[in-house]
Amino acid sequence: MQITRNTRGVHDIADWDPEDVTAWNAGGAKVARRNLIWSIIAEHVGFSVWSIWSVMVLFMPQDVYHIDAAGKFVLVAVPTVVGAVLRIPYASAVTRFGGRNWTIFSALVLLVPAALTLYFMAKPGTSYTTFILVAAFAGLGGGNFASSMANINAFYPQRLKGWALGLNAGGGNIGVAAIQLIGLMVIATVGNRSPQLVCAAYLVLIGVAALGAALFMDNLTNHTSNARVMIDVLAYRDSWLIALLYIGTFGSFIGFGFAFGQVLQINFLATLADHGPITSAMTAQAALHAAQIAFIGPVLGSLARPAGGWLADRVGGAKVTLYTFVAMTAAAAWLVASGEIDDATAGVPSGMTMAALIGGFIVLFILSGIGNGSTYKMIPSIFEAKARGLAHLGAAERQAWSRRMSGALIGIAGAVGALGGVGVNMALRASYLSPAKSATMAFWAFLAFYVLCGAITWMAYVRAPRSSAVNAAGRPALDAVSAA
């Protein structure tokens, strides 16, 4: 393993082999850690920009911007769609352009949505269509996750991937909470009429992330792939199953992260409306209360993600994922029960049902974070197991094949999982537009989906035969995945 510089000072690492224990202990671990730190920072800023509209809607009182709650759910969903689609090309970009080079570019391009949001949020008379287009640019931040994860997957050995990928993703995920916390500070100090302060702060942070990547990250010259691998990986049933499971974990996390503040604001306004007509002061008060609580869920969910990866390294990715879905089903059932009570009391939340709503969501945030870490740990384990069956390849070729396939599935699963966030927002939108005007219908949908994901995890992985690394059906055995 060696590090070379070209005349422009760009770091290129040749012959990177994280499974070489001697080289890893002799300095490879330090190099990987340095790249991980700045990958986390850049991904963190990307997540913040991606979720910026979950904060902006709290700064958009209906009497000023003339956008109702249903319209705001769409505004929040649009960046999710764009970010999900971009994750596929972003995942392969690091192998084409280099992890360091792509991180610099993907950070700098975030200046566009940050600047556009800053400009148009200061113009309340802007058309709804324009706001939709501006929100779409925020989706650029959603692609960063796939490129960052594919890059870090190549830097770390199999025995540490669960922890490294969980830490990288968790540090990025917490960007959802960070921007909500900044939004809270702005609302608490100057009110809900100064969203430009949030955007201005991120113009600076984007510059810091890009500069840090330029100075401290590296390109792996032997980390190669091609567009074909994205197609090849889809030939495996496991790719489709993992993508579906990731909808349940990451789709829940990002969907709740984008929608939680608005759900709280709607419920706080419903409580205030019981005491008279809604005024601008009440709207501002509801926005502040929502912001005071909304960031807690993403913070805890992000911190839980490395724990999920760590547990998966020791207990097995499939087992942790299964237990997570069982617990998420119970949490969703709790939300259904609290919603039914709310609906029975004419849709005006009591203090008890508000506490139940907040508690149920926070538990789901934590569980989705754990499931994110354990599900992603399953990806390299699956392809490491499959690589053992490729007897016609040498050890180095099998390792390279496993790394390429894992990187491709990381991008695809990330993209499909992010679309789950769109489903969460659209389910909540439809539920609030229903005659009951509550989220109960959406909670029922979440519960049913978690049951499905738990059943798939049990049948496809936890029950998998132990007889070989890859069985006749093409599934990794329990020893390779559930106990990896």
Image: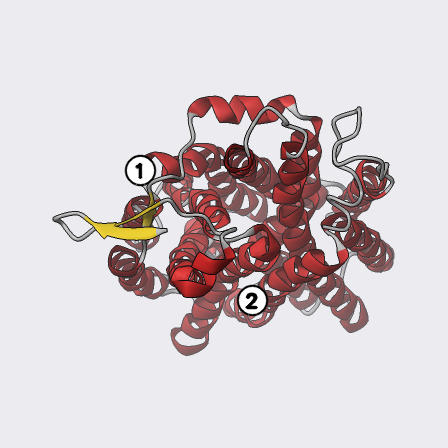
* Vertical arrangement, residue 410 with respect to residue 63, above or below: above
In the rendered image, residue 425, in percent from the top left (x then y), is placed at 62, 44
In the rendered image, residue 121, in percent from the top left (x then y), is placed at 34, 53
Q: Nearer the viewer, mark 1 or mark 2?
A: 1
> Can residue 423 be seen by looking at this rendering?
no
Q: Is residue 21 left or right of residue 126?
A: right
Residue at 56% of width from left, 66% of height from top?
Answer: 295
Q: Which residue is mark 2?
A: 295
Q: Quadrant of residue 364?
A: bottom right
* Vertical arrangement, residue 68 with respect to residue 206, above or below: above
* Vertical arrangement, residue 377 with respect to residue 285, above or below: above
Residue at 64% of width from left, 54% of height from top?
Answer: 373
In the rendered image, residue 138, in percent from the top left (x then y), is placed at 40, 45
Type of amino acid at the residue the image marks with label 1 = Phe
Type of amino acid at the residue the image marks with label 2 = Phe
Between marks 1 and 2, how big is the CA–CA gap?
Answer: 35 Å
Q: Quadrant of residue 455?
A: top right
Q: Is residue 379 left or right of residue 222?
A: right
Residue in the foreground of this view, choosing between 468 and 203: 468
* Vertical arrangement, residue 167 with respect to residue 123, above or below: below
> Can residue 29 be seen by looking at this rendering?
yes
Residue at 60% of width from left, 62% of height from top?
Answer: 306
In the rendered image, residue 356, in percent from the top left (x then y), is placed at 78, 66
Q: Which label belongs to residue 97?
A: 1
